[in-house]
Image: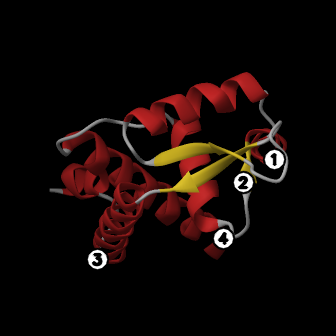
Amino acid sequence: MATTQQAEQLVGILRDTVVALVRRDGPDLSARQLGVFLTCYLQEGAHTVRGLAADLNVSKPAITRALDRLGELDLARRKVDPMDRRSVLVQRTLKGSAFLRDLRSIMGEAATGSRRGGSESARKVVA
């Protein structure tokens, strides 16, 4: 079935991407942190803690912890909404944009490798 093969290929790309991120110099992001990061960078519009919690179906404290880490790494920053001082906006950073560019490159390499014959782990098993 083509759908199963496509799903397997996507899982292989995901695995190879995560392994490449873990192996490279620099900090690792948890799945939640990466989910928050990608939501902020790939979805247009203003992002708030409340909105991210609703989008990802997790608690506001979980989003706050993820944003704390992203802030430590300068991948995102929080700013009080000048229109509603009770609300906190999440802003993109130059370092975050560079990280997204690197992530796209890593995923592209993983996808190319996957099309050539499976994920890195699958190639090792065959070899």
- The residue wearing badge 4 is 3
Q: Position of residue 123 (x, y in %)?
A: 24, 58
Q: Position of residue 97 (x, y in %)?
A: 41, 64
Q: Amino acid at mark 2?
A: His
- Residue 116 tag number: 3
The CA span between labels 3 and 2 is 38 Å
Is disc 1 in contact with disc 2, using a CB cutoff of under 8 Å? yes
- The residue wearing badge 1 is 51
Q: Is residue 84 left or right of residue 1?
A: right
Q: Amino acid at mark 3?
A: Arg
Q: Is residue 106 left or right of residue 86?
A: left
Q: Coloured how?
A: secondary structure
Q: Amino acid at mark 4?
A: Thr
- The residue wearing badge 2 is 47
Q: Position of residue 72 (x, y in %)?
A: 40, 33
The CA span between labels 4 and 1 is 33 Å
The image quarter in which residue 47 lies: bottom right
The CA span between labels 1 and 2 is 6 Å
Is disc 3 in contact with disc 1, using a CB cutoff of under 8 Å? no
> SS for tag 3?
loop
Which badge, 4 or 1, comes first in the chain's sequence? Answer: 4
